[in-house]
Image (tube, coloured by chain):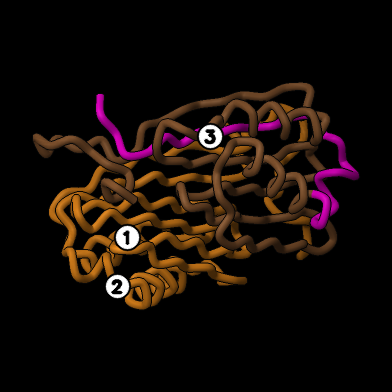
Chain colours: A orange, B brown
């Protein structure tokens, strides 16, 4: 089934409170996970909530990485949405699991942009 | 089933080429959809690809809205991830469908952060 993108929806449970409540650290870890996957960061936006919690998104050439943390529950919601066959999502997820100290991870992968146009799909223009 | 968030994964097909290739317009439409849902914008990041396509994310107090467009296929991938019971995701989706001129929409809704901690879940601290 031909699709434009792959969307990994990951639930990280039982994470380390201090790590996922530190917005600078969460941003560093997310940006490093982008690098490890082979994706290319365009821009990132991170926000710290009071009294706890972090939300952040990295727009990458291949789509986006997003995170929302609830330190009080030891939980992070992570999305890794990428296009093309060259991105190693698993490398990103393995790194995030290790850095967040998550003891329990649940992952669902969805195809995005499943089109029946009778043509080959290119996630970016041919030749670019 | 108690969950911290709701994640709507929407596929907009057969959209208007000019609209979904105009990154300023796509940003305006996304920000307006956030307003219509009752969510609160914190920061947004939008990027135009060459020769076509737009990626953008709006970080909101309640999580995030994201979009990636492939004008050449008339397709947009939209995510609306929100927390709490006060956000009207449907209002956002209806508005996006209308503005993008999409003739065909597919939607999946997932619960995020389904935790079995034996306590009531609060998407933000009680009293805030």
Measure the alpha-carbon separation of dots 1 and 3.
23 Å
Out of A37 and A23, give the one closest to the viewer: A23
Asked if the residue under mark 2 is in contact with the one under mark 1, i.e. CB atoms within 8 Å, the reply is no
Chain bearing tag 2 is: A
Q: Secondary structure at mark 3?
A: strand
Q: What residue occupies the far right of the structure in this picture?
A: B18
Residue B16: x, y in percent? 86, 36
Distance from the alpha carbon under mark 3 to that under mark 2:
28 Å
Q: Chain of mark 3?
A: B
Q: Residue at x 55, y 30 (%)?
A: B88
Q: Which mark is residue B9?
A: 3
Look at the numbered disc 2 and give the secondary structure of its residue.
Answer: loop
Please say if the residues under marks 1 and 3 sit with CB atoms less than 8 Å apart: no
Tell me where residue B55 sits by quadrant: bottom right
From the viewer's perspective, tell me whether residue B8 is left or right of residue A125: left
The nearer-to-camera label among 3 and 2 is 2
Q: Is residue B122 above or below residue A54?
A: above
* Residue hosting label 1: A53
Of A8 and B5, the residue lying toward us? B5
Residue A48 in the image: x percent, y percent? 39, 67
Q: Is residue B4 visible?
A: yes
Q: Which corner quadrant of the image does residue A84 belong to? A: bottom right
Front residue of A50 and B59: A50
In magenta, the rendered stretch is B1-25
Magenta span contains residue A43: no
């Amino acid at each position: 089934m031909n699709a434009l993108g792959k969307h990994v929806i990951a639930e990280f449970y039982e994470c380390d409170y201090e790590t996922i409540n530190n917005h600078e650290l969460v941003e560093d870890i997310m940006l490093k996970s982008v690098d490890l996957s082979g994706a290319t960061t365009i821009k990132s936006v991170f926000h710290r909530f009071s009294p706890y919690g972090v939300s952040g998104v990295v727009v990458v050439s291949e789509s986006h990485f997003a995170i929302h943390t609830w330190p009080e529950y030891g939980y992070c919601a992570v999305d890794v949405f990428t296009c093309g066959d060259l991105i190693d999502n698993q490398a990103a997820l393995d790194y995030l699991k290790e850095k967040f100290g998550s003891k329990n991870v649940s992952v669902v992968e969805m195809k995005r942009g499943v089109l029946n146009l009778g043509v080959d799909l290119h996630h970016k223009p041919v030749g670019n």
